[in-house]
Image (spheres, coloured by chain):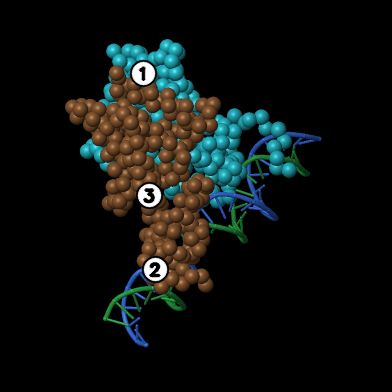
Chain colours: A cyan, B brown, C blue, D green
Amino acid sequence: MTTRVGKKPAAPRKRAYHHGDLRQALVDATLKLIATEDVGAVSLREVARRAGVTAAAPYHHFRDKDALLAAVAEEGYRALNQRMDESLSSIRAPRTDNQLRALARCYVRFAVEHPAHYRVMFRQEWGDEEKYASLHAEGMRAYGRLQELAKETTGGKVDMDTLAFTVWAWVHGLASLWNEGPLRKKTRSDSIEPLLERSVELFVGWVMPK
Amino acid sequence: MTTRVGKKPAAPRKRAYHHGDLRQALVDATLKLIATEDVGAVSLREVARRAGVTAAAPYHHFRDKDALLAAVAEEGYRALNQRMDESLSSIRAPRTDNQLRALARCYVRFAVEHPAHYRVMFRQEWGDEEKYASLHAEGMRAYGRLQELAKETTGGKVDMDTLAFTVWAWVHGLASLWNEGPLRKKTRSDSIEPLLERSVELFVGWVMPK
DNA sequence: CTCTTATCTGAACAGTGCTCATATAGACTG
DNA sequence: CAGTCTATATGAGCACTGTTCAGATAAGAG
């Protein structure tokens, strides 16, 4: 039947079929949608509409709506990872404290610049790591950077995972609290930058005292 | 028909057409729903169904679905605040480090024990603080505890708000990362307790060095 | 007792996720 | 080239959703 016969060995590029590459087009349409609207405005039908295709077409590329959103989330992690790489490689004095500063800043900035996208990345639905394996893989790449940094900092002797977790919790908390509101209301500025800068210095002072 | 009590001041029993306190019944039904299912399973119609009422009835008590969820969120903050109060008042040696430990533990535990409820409390929809004034008020009561603690810690001299924010970000991050998955997968235990305990000691050691 | 008002119903509308039989267009085989 | 074969897209349809609205009903005020 329509179950895979194993003939097609992971086509590197989907050529011009009916649409071209509908899968990516759907992901892009979703990204464009959540860039302005919030994630609640994402409906499979609207996404299909924007891709110029019927409501049933996406089901040939994604198992269901969650599968599309998972692909969007995965691309979020990819973008975040790339940004972290760029940020780390552009440090003049690559001491661990500067690396922590760079990672924290670009993590929080990414989340604040793309709130809906960031929210999709952390939906509870992605819990099943077999079902969403590639998403988890990409997410773990991000965590890997924190782990490496933690290893350098602690010298591997004490509880490096706890440190990495705690750092992640901190930046994720800053970003989430800002994006979801309650934190935003307590500060004068409409930018997170001042708060971010102060929190970073506070935190770095704790983790890496001179 | 069941018992027909003449007076009905505080609405003990669901009565026929006009049922005692539908508003609270709807909130309770939602709470019962998200105690087992996740928040995506909450539909106004299902909640109405469980309250033994038609789909249109809730609209006499809540402007829309979000208004119901906001009431649920508000009750979440109330429960959290109560738990924090109890926790703080049951400390033997009320030093600031013990207070921070207590707050962090009971905050994270609440979030982990009621993941869906906690998630509702931090929906981006509550951004409008005029529209959801009472919700924001209850949320700020929770933040107030952190602020007080930060004031005691810093003696009011340095950046107490930054400290309070950072602490909040930390506990919120721990709870969120655990609930939404990525963190959970990196630890052996199916309980957050070991990780929580280590993170708490790490953090307290930073904020309040001996 | 009548009248008023808050509450609840039943029906309806538009929109959703998803399935299925059917149509079509590239790609593969001969 | 013709003749498949299969992935892709369609359009209709189902069950469900949030929300509105005219009308029924109950509870309380006069």
Vertical position of residue A42 compared to residue D26: above or below? above
The kind of residue tagged 3 is: Glu
Q: Nearer the viewer, mark 2 or mark 3?
A: 2
Determine which of the numbered discs, if any, sits on residue B189 in the image. none
The kind of residue tagged 1 is: Gln
At 37% from the left and 53% from the top, the residue drawn is B71
Chain letter behind tag 1: A
Query: Disc 1, disc 3: CB below 8 Å?
Result: no
Callout 3: helix, strand or loop? Answer: helix
The foreground one among A210 and B149 is B149
Vertical position of residue A193 compared to residue D28: above or below? above
**Image quarter of residue A58:** top right
Determine which of the numbered discs, if any, sits on residue A99 in the image. 1
Left or right, A4 with reference to C7: right
Chain letter behind tag 3: B
- Between discs 2 and 3, the one toward the N terminus: 2
Place of residue C13 in the rendered image (x, y in percent of width and height, measured from the top left): 48, 66
Real-space CA distance between mark 2 and mark 3, rounded to the nearest whole angstrom = 24 Å
The kind of residue tagged 2 is: Lys
Left or right, B136 with reference to C16: left
Determine which of the numbered discs, if any, sits on residue B75 in the image. 3
Determine which of the numbered discs, if any, sits on residue B8 in the image. 2
